[in-house]
Image (cartoon, rainbow, N blue to C red):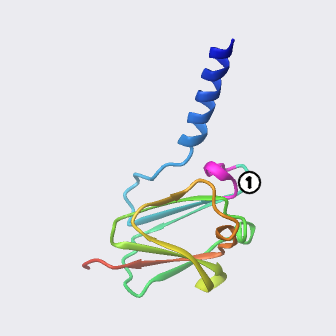
């Protein structure tokens, strides 16, 4: 019985971990933002994607349901794409984090949950 319980727990853990994954669609960048940890979609989620080829950077705002509610996310991009997270809409307020290339967080910190917008900057050759 214990072995079966451990197996069921392991399968459940594997399923919850595998919910978050990097995209293979092939867009310049893709950002998936979730209202639940481990990329659960039951409490809202949003997706953003595009070429991301603007060296002057583009800003993207979350829908109001996701403001201050980002519990997990995946960002898929090349190493030429920089993403910056911001506390306020229109990429204003405090910067809450940044990364170049792929970035995933399955359980965002309390301060990171305050994210309301993000910026994509292209740093490579055009």
Taking depth in this image into account, of 57 and 83 the one nearest to the observer is: 83
Q: Quick check: 117 above or below 16?
A: below
User: Residue 46: which quarter of the image?
Assistant: bottom right
Does residue 36 show up magenta in the picture? yes
In this image, 43 relative to 62: left or right? right
Outermost residue, top side: 1
Q: Residues within 10 Å of mark 1 (few under 14, many from 20)?
A: some
What residue range appears in magenta?
34-41
Q: Which residue is mark 1?
A: 43
Outermost residue, left side: 125
Q: Position of residue 90 (x, y in %)?
A: 61, 85
Outermost residue, front side: 2
Taking depth in this image into account, of 18 and 64 the one nearest to the observer is: 18
Locate the C terminus and report the quarter of the image it occupies: bottom left
Locate the N terminus and report the quarter of the image it occupies: top right
Residue at 65% across, 63% down: 109
Q: Quick check: 59 above or below 72?
A: below
Residue at 62% across, 84% down: 94
Q: Position of residue 74 (x, y in %)?
A: 52, 58
Q: Position of residue 103 (x, y in %)?
A: 47, 61
Taking depth in this image into account, of 72 and 42 the one nearest to the observer is: 72
Residue at 53% across, 41% down: 18
Taking depth in this image into account, of 125 and 108 the one nearest to the observer is: 108
Helix, strand, or loop for circle 1? loop
In this image, 79 relative to 23: left or right? left
User: Residue 57: which quarter of the image?
Assistant: bottom left
User: Residue 19: which quarter of the image?
Assistant: top right
Q: Quick check: 78 above or below 59?
A: above
Residue at 71% across, 71% down: 67
Q: Position of residue 101 (x, y in %)?
A: 39, 65
In this image, 103 relative to 53: left or right? right
């Amino acid at each position: 019985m214990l072995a079966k319980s451990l197996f069921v727990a392991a399968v459940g853990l594997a399923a919850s971990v595998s919910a978050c994954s990097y995209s293979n669609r092939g867009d310049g960048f893709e950002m998936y933002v979730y209202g639940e940890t481990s990329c659960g979609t039951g409490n809202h989620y949003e997706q953003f994607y595009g070429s991301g080829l603007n060296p002057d950077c583009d800003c993207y705002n979350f829908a109001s349901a996701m403001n201050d509610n980002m519990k997990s996310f995946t960002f898929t991009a090349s190493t030429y794409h920089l993403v910056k997270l911001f506390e306020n809409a229109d990429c204003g307020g405090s910067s809450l984090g940044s990364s170049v290339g792929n970035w995933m967080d399955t359980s965002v910190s309390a301060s990171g949950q305050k994210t309301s917008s993000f910026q994509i900057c292209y740093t490579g050759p055009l």
